[in-house]
Image: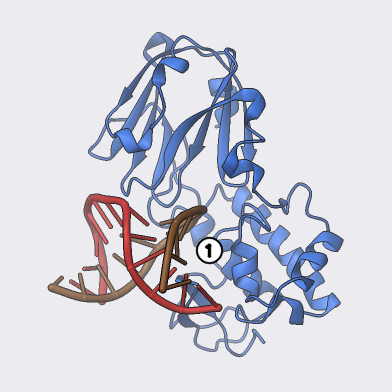
Chain colours: A blue, B red, C brown
Amino acid sequence: MQLEKFLRGKKITGVEIKTAKSFPDDKKKVLGARMTGTRRFGKVLVIDLDNGYSLLVHLKLTGQLLVGGTIGPHTRVIINLEKGQRLIFNDLRIFGWIKIADSGQVIADRLISKLGLEPLKDLTLTKFKDLLAKTARPIKIVLMDQEKISGVGNIYANDALWLAGIDPRTPARQLDGSTAGQLYEAVLEVLKKGIRYGGASDQHYIKPDGTKGKYQEHFLVYGREKMPCLRCKAKIEKFFLGGRGTYVCEVCQK
DNA sequence: AGTATCCTGGAA
DNA sequence: TTCCAGGATACT
């Protein structure tokens, strides 16, 4: 289901906020407005309204934005629409949020203006290489740094590095041109694959229609601790890098 | 660059 | 009871 198609043209008739932290702004700004379309910047979903405001949605780790469905203990916000339809925002850990911004200022919004280039939009190979050359930070940290590259999270960073055969700890500027090129292609590939499979419903994520994504059935290395490497059968190791679970085949990834 | 912090709950 | 989770930020 295309969220945009469902939302477009629908009027917001009410907003019920169960957890203030999940919807910190004044809901009056969006009441009675009609949704005109959606945009996406990195991991932020933007729902534009016809009254000059936009809703910004970030699911973080456990957020779910659902069309319909049942209200549960983790329902934080209910956005009522016409004809009894509604959007439900569930979020177990309350890290996610729905914020309001001026539509014209969305790009200037503090969070969005700081986002880096997107692999599937404007990150060219040249820009990618330039970016890596500027830092000695571990390559996985750079891939996940939203201010440098936006949209790549822990799962896709792990998988892209495995696919490209690169150790996540490698200082970014140490990657030579052809290796950086392989990584660039790998990032594009895992992201496309993630989208094709509807995302990874590993823990909490589900699609707006309540169905699960299938990328978790195609993880390359993420979550495969102690399991055989899909390429060489060596045992996958897990450690923490920048505080995040990092999976690596010590044989394939150098 | 590493660590704590915001939260909750399922698994170890 | 401790550890860990698709994220991001504010601190040493």
Identify the secondary structure beneath mark 1: helix
A178 over A20 or under it: above or below: below
Where is residue B7? Give x, y as percent. 26, 50
What is the quadrant of residue A98 in the picture? top left
Q: How many marks?
A: 1
Q: Residues within 10 Å of mark 1 (few under 14, many from 20)?
A: some
Residue A63 placed where, x, y %?
Answer: 40, 44
Q: A29 left or right of A137?
A: left
For label 1, the residue is A154
Q: For the point 64% across and 67% down, which residue is it?
A: A142
Toward which corner of the image does residue A50 lie, by quadrant? top right
Instruction: Please state the chain letter of the residue tagged with numbered disc 1 in the rendered image.
Output: A
Which quadrant is home to the C terminus of chain A? bottom right
State the residue at coordinates (38%, 26%): A68
- In this view of the protein, can residue A232 be seen by the observer? yes
Q: Amino acid at mark 1?
A: Asn
Residue at (64%, 53%) from the top-left corner? A150
The N terminus of chain A, quarter of image: top right
Residue A210 makes an appearance in the image: no
In this image, C2 relative to A135: left or right?
left
Above or below for A214 versus C1: above
* A198 lies left or right of A119: left
Looking at this view, is A200 or A149 the one in front? A149
Q: Is residue A230 above or below residue A222?
A: below
Residue A218 in the image: state x and y as whole percent: 55, 63
Q: Residue at x 57, y 46 (%)?
A: A43
Quadrant of the image occupied by residue A177: bottom right
Residue A10 placed where, x, y %? 52, 14
